[in-house]
Image (cartoon, helix red, strand yellow):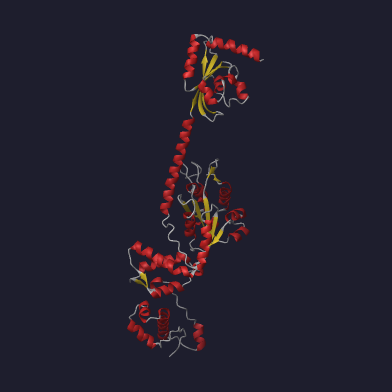
C-alpha cells in the first residue's frame, strides 16, 4: 500500500511541479523558504507535495511527517486538527480559518485551490500566517480595556461612598476586646461576618479590616443589599452581557463583584439577599468565580467578602429564608459589634469626634456645654452610633449659641407624670411646684457633677450669683429630689 502510494505521489508530483532538479523548481523552493508565512502544498487528491521551513516552525511538524501523506490520513491521525485543504477541495473555493497548533501558536490559514483547463483541481496551496503575537496583543488589549472599565467603575462607586473609614474609636474595654479580634482577622484572607444592631458601626469595622489587610491598595466596594430591588440584585452584583434582558446596556455591564476584583466587597444587610442570588454568592465563595447574566462563560474573581447583618441568620436558616450552606461559609469568623449602650466609654469620644468633623465641615467652633455632655452620656442611644452622629449634626446646625445645650440635642425626655399616682394621693397637679422641682434637680445635679459653683452655673447657662441664690433657695442639699409636693 505504501509503495503504491509513494509511486502515485512521485508521478503526480512530477506532473504538477516537474523534476525536483529543474531550475524552476529549485527557484520555487528558494521562494517558499524565504517566506515568513508557512506554506503547505497538496495535489488535487490532498496528497502532500511540499512544505516550507516556516510551516515546520509554526506547526511543529517535520517534512518527514507529512510529505507524501494524504491530508485525510493526517487529520484522522490527529497530526492536523482541522484542514483548510480538505474544505477547499470540497467547496472548490478559497477557505480561510483559524487554527491552533501543538506548539501553542495561533495561525490564520488560507487554502486556495488551483484548476487546470478542464476545471479539475490539480493543487491546493495553503498559506499559514502566525498570529500568535497578534493574539497576545489582542488579549492584552482586552485585559487593559477590562481594567480601564473596572477602574472607571471603581471611581464611580467610590465617589458615591461619601464617608470613608473615619477614625476608628475604641476606648471602652468592651470595644477594645472586639478590636483585638478584628486586628487578628484583618490580615487574613478569610471571609468575615459582622453581626450587631443597626447603626453600631459595622461598615466602619469592614473598612478598618480592609485597610489593615494585604488588599488595602485595592478598592473596597460597599453594597447595601437591602437597598437594591430584589429583581436587580443579581445584575448589580454579578453584571450582565449585552442584550441579556429588556433595558440592558448594549455593551453589557460589569458587576460590583468584578469591580472589587483583587480588593474587598462589603455586603451590608446580607440577610436581605434573595435565595437565588445566595446560590451565586455561595459559588463565588467556593469556586472564586462568577457568571454574568446571559453568559455561559465563568469568570475567575479574586475578592475578599465581608458580610454584615442585624438579623438572626440562624433563625432565618430554620425557616428556610437563608441557605444553610451559605450561612456556614459566611460564619467562619463571625464578629459581634457591641451596641453603644454596652460601650459607654466610647460615647463621649465619638460625640467629640463628630463635633470636630462637623465644625470643620460647617466652619463652626461650637462645643458641648457640660450639661449637654451629661445628657449625651446618660442617654441609651437605641440607634447607636448612627443616631449619635445624627443628633450631633442636628444640634450643630440648630444651636443658636456657641455652646450646645441639652435642648439643642433633643434627646432629653422628662419622666411622665402618672395621673394615677397623683389621684391616689388625693393631690391636684401643681405646675409651679413641678417646675421648681425640675429646676432644683438640675441645680443639684450640676453641682454633683462639677463640685464647683462656677462650672455648675456655666453648665446651666446662668451666672454664678444666680446659681448660688437658687441653690440656697432649694436648700443646697446636693441630692436629687423628684417627689411632687403640694404647698
Tell me if residue 8 can be seen. Answer: yes
Q: Position of residue 348 (x, y in %)?
A: 43, 69
29 with respect to 457 (left or right):
right
Q: Position of residue 292 (x, y in %)?
A: 52, 44
Looking at the image, the residue that sits furthest to the bottom is 487
Say above or below: 407 vs 273.
below
Say above or below: 281 vs 8.
below
Number of marks in picture: 0
Say above or below: 89 vs 142.
above
Determine the residue positioned at 51% across, 83% down: 420
Q: Position of residue 229 (x, y in %)?
A: 50, 53
Determine the residue positioned at 41% across, 73% down: 373
Looking at the image, the residue that sits furthest to the right is 1
Tell me if residue 250 can be seen. Answer: no
Which one is nearer the viewer's eye here, 142 or 10?
Answer: 10
Which one is nearer the viewer's eye here, 63 or 113?
Answer: 63
Q: Position of residue 83 (x, y in %)?
A: 56, 24
In which quadrant of the rendered image does the C terminus lie?
A: bottom left
Which one is nearer the viewer's eye here, 114 or 284?
Answer: 284
In which quadrant of the rendered image does the N terminus lie?
A: top right
Amino acid at each position: 500500500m505504501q509503495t503504491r502510494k509513494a509511486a502515485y505521489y512521485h508521478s503526480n508530483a512530477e506532473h504538477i511541479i516537474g523534476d525536483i532538479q529543474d531550475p524552476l523548481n529549485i527557484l520555487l523552493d528558494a521562494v517558499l523558504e524565504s517566506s515568513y508565512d508557512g506554506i503547505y502544498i497538496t495535489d488535487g487528491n490532498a496528497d502532500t507535495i511540499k512544505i516550507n521551513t516556516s510551516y515546520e516552525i509554526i506547526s511543529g511538524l517535520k517534512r518527514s511527517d507529512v510529505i507524501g501523506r494524504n491530508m485525510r490520513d493526517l487529520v484522522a491521525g490527529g497530526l492536523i486538527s482541522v484542514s483548510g485543504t480538505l474544505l477547499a477541495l470540497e467547496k472548490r473555493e478559497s477557505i480561510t480559518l483559524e487554527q491552533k497548533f501543538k506548539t501553542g501558536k495561533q495561525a490564520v490559514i488560507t487554502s486556495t485551490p488551483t484548476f487546470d483547463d478542464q476545471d479539475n483541481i490539480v493543487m491546493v496551496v495553503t498559506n499559514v500566517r502566525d498570529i500568535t503575537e497578534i493574539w497576545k496583543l489582542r488579549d492584552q488589549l482586552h485585559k487593559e480595556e477590562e481594567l480601564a472599565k473596572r477602574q472607571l467603575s471603581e471611581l464611580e462607586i467610590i465617589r458615591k461612598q461619601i464617608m470613608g473609614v473615619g477614625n476608628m474609636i475604641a476606648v471602652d474595654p468592651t470595644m477594645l476586646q472586639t478590636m483585638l479580634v478584628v486586628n487578628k482577622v484583618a490580615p487574613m484572607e478569610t471571609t468575615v461576618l459582622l453581626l450587631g444592631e443597626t447603626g453600631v458601626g459595622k461598615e466602619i469595622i469592614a473598612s478598618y479590616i480592609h485597610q489593615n489587610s494585604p488588599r488595602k491598595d485595592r478598592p473596597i466596594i460597599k453594597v447595601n443589599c437591602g437597598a437594591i430591588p430584589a429583581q436587580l440584585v443579581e445584575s448589580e452584583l454579578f453584571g450582565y452581557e449585552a442584550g441579556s434582558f429588556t433595558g440592558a446596556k448594549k455593551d453589557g455591564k460589569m458587576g460590583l463583584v468584578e469591580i472589587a476584583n483583587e480588593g474587598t466587597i462589603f455586603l451590608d444587610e446580607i440577610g436581605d439577599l434573595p435565595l437565588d442570588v445566595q446560590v451565586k454568592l455561595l459559588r463565588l465563595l467556593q469556586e472564586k468565580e462568577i457568571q454574568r447574566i446571559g453568559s455561559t462563560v465563568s469568570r475567575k474573581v479574586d475578592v475578599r467578602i465581608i458580610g454584615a447583618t442585624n438579623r438572626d441568620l440562624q433563625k432565618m436558616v430554620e425557616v428556610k429564608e437563608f441557605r444553610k450552606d451559605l450561612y456556614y461559609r459566611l460564619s467562619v469568623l463571625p464578629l459581634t459589634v457591641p451596641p453603644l449602650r454596652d460601650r459607654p466609654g466610647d460615647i463621649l469620644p465619638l460625640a467629640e469626634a463628630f463635633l470636630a468633623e462637623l465644625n470643620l465641615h460647617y466652619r463652626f467652633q461650637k462645643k458641648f456645654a457640660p450639661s449637654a455632655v451629661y445628657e449625651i452620656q446618660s442617654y441609651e442611644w437605641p440607634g447607636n452610633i448612627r443616631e449619635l452622629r445624627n443628633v450631633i449634626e442636628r444640634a450643630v446646625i440648630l444651636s443658636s449659641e456657641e455652646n450646645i445645650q441639652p435642648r439643642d440635642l433633643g434627646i432629653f425626655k422628662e419622666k411622665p407624670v402618672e395621673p394615677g399616682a397623683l389621684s391616689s394621693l388625693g393631690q391636684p397637679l401643681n405646675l409651679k411646684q413641678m417646675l421648681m422641682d425640675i429646676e432644683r434637680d438640675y441645680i443639684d445635679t450640676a453641682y454633683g457633677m462639677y463640685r464647683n459653683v462656677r462650672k455648675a452655673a456655666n453648665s446651666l447657662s446662668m451666672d454664678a450669683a444666680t446659681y448660688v441664690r437658687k441653690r440656697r433657695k432649694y436648700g443646697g442639699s446636693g441630692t436629687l429630689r423628684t417627689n411632687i409636693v403640694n404647698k
